[in-house]
Amino acid sequence: MTAPSLDALLPLAHDITAALTSADRSRRLVEVVRRALPCDAVALLQLEGDTLVPAACFGLSEDVYGRRFRRNEHPRLDQLCANDAPTRFPADSPLPDPFDGLVIGGATKLEGHVHSCIGCSLRVEGELVGVLTADALEPGAFDHVDDRFLAHLAALAGAALRTNQLIEALHERAEHLGVVARDLVSDAMQRRGSLLIGTSDLLERLRREINLVARSEFPVLVTGETGVGKELVVRHLHAASTRADQPLVYLNCAALPEAIAESELFGHAKGAFTGAEQARRGKFRTADGGTLFLDEIGELALSLQAKLLRALQQGEIQSVGADEIVHVDVRVIAATNRDIDAEVRAGRFRADLLHRLDVCRLNVPPLRDHAEDVPHLVGHFADANRTRLGIGPVRVSQEAQRALAGGAWPGNVRELENVVARGVLRASARVEPGEPVSVEASDVDLGEPRAAAPAEPPPPLPAGTASLREAVKEYQCRLVREALEQANGNWSAAARALGLDRGNLHHLARRLGLKG
């Protein structure tokens, strides 16, 4: 019998760089071996942990693809893995062959024991990636195959197998990133900007709390009324965290039908239920390594709360219809506009889940508590809508500013944003494209004005004040000057009297022109 030529291996070299799927490349590799060697069966096995998994086979029963070959249970395969050089097993070897009884003979029925067996470990840069075996029913079938040919075959097969692994990893990563891209909550950042707009003490305090909490790995519970900007706070938390370069994945628990909630959170296996034609990763696996934002957590069904608790406690999830438990590394940030403590007392939310989520709580204040930030927000939203509508510069009249500052804003920042957007749109209809747009009081549709608090009347504004902004600035200047006078020029004492951080007072004084 003629020894195989190295030319028989050329197709393997070509296939390594060809645009083939992993399955096609594996099948073609086995086909080359089958043609080059006088064998009845060929098996390409990929190493996964301590187990060899069939990647492609020839001449073996189909059920071999459902088998897994542990090294410690198959001494021949273990010996192949241990040897760097090709291995030949004599026909009378006492070691059981893993493919005995699985070789398909010429009559397409399973034959008896294998009599000739050769194989080689497949290594890339010294790392074992799999094994390649060839079996024959005839003793001495491989006597004319020299070790040099087998060594070249092993090198090319190892490279092909590693190429398959890299391609599969890239495909999996691409699929993962595709899911992430659909789940990333980027629209609000683009629509509402990426900044917490305002200079009030409440917002300054919130910024400090965000920066402090973000650096930890603790779960965070963000509370606040509808429209206060909880989602924006979550984005800042993620952006300032050590996971900033990983996905931020969003799930609205209020919009989650209970029938599919478990699948959305933890995924499902193919065929787990009617209509499950493909496996689904679920939000936890999509967010693996990053942050999962559970919005409106107070709306989550009690039946799901226990499973969410396990995921938080153990870092373990189990997809619907799957047997295996998957470990994930996810930081959970939850948000709610409900009184979550009252929900616990009413039995609608699990106390143990709240304790797990409520390691750090951030409360986002309603707009009425920092109304001094309204002018800043109005300017921000006016400019954002200029870009969105593709119009000229947008100016908001003094009358419109006063009307907006006097609004009740039960819908908080979100309501203010919508009112400004409608006002800019209406005002833009009066001018030609590209010309300046002036938003008047008649353009802003407000509800009932906010009722004045039954307190002492504010000090009179300076006569001839041209705008609300100038009036606020003059009032701030007066307060700072008086505090400094009473503190004999001591900035720290003045800051304490005004309830400000010393650094913030210096910043405010520079902005007001009181300090260089």
Image: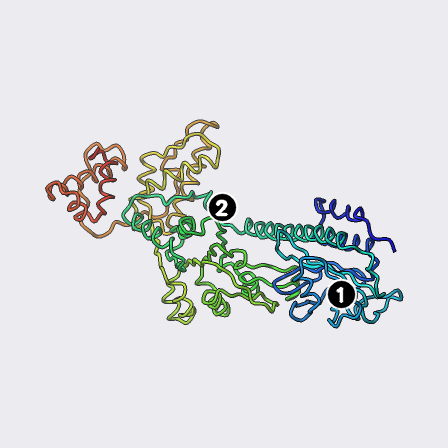
> Type of residue at label 1?
Phe
Q: Which is nearer the N-term, disc 2 or disc 1? A: 1
Report whether 406 appears left or right of 259: left
Q: Which residue is more in the foreground, 228 or 281?
A: 281
How far across and down, in percent of the image, does residue 247 sit?
50, 51
Within 10 Å of the Cα at label 2, are there few (<14), some (14-19), or many (20+) other Cα atoms?
Answer: few
How far across and down, in percent of the image, does residue 385 sit?
44, 37
Within 10 Å of the Cα at label 1, are there few (<14), some (14-19), or many (20+) other Cα atoms?
Answer: some
**Residue bearing mark 2:** 187
How far across and down, in percent of the image, does residue 8 sit?
80, 48
Q: Where's the C terminus, which quadrant?
A: top left
Q: Which residue is more in the foreground, 193 or 212?
A: 212
Q: Which residue is more in the foreground, 175 or 162?
A: 162
Report how far apart the C-alphas of labels 2 and 1 lie in the structure: 63 Å
To which quarter of the image does residue 19 belong? top right
Which residue is located at x 63 percent, y 60 percent? 279
> Type of residue at label 2?
Asp
How far across and down, in percent of the image, does residue 386 sit?
44, 34
Q: How many marks?
A: 2
Q: Residue furthest right?
A: 107
Q: Nearer the viewer, mark 2 or mark 1?
A: 1
Number of the label disc, if any, that sits on residue 89: 1
User: Is residue 85 placed above or below 506 in the rendered structure?
Assistant: below
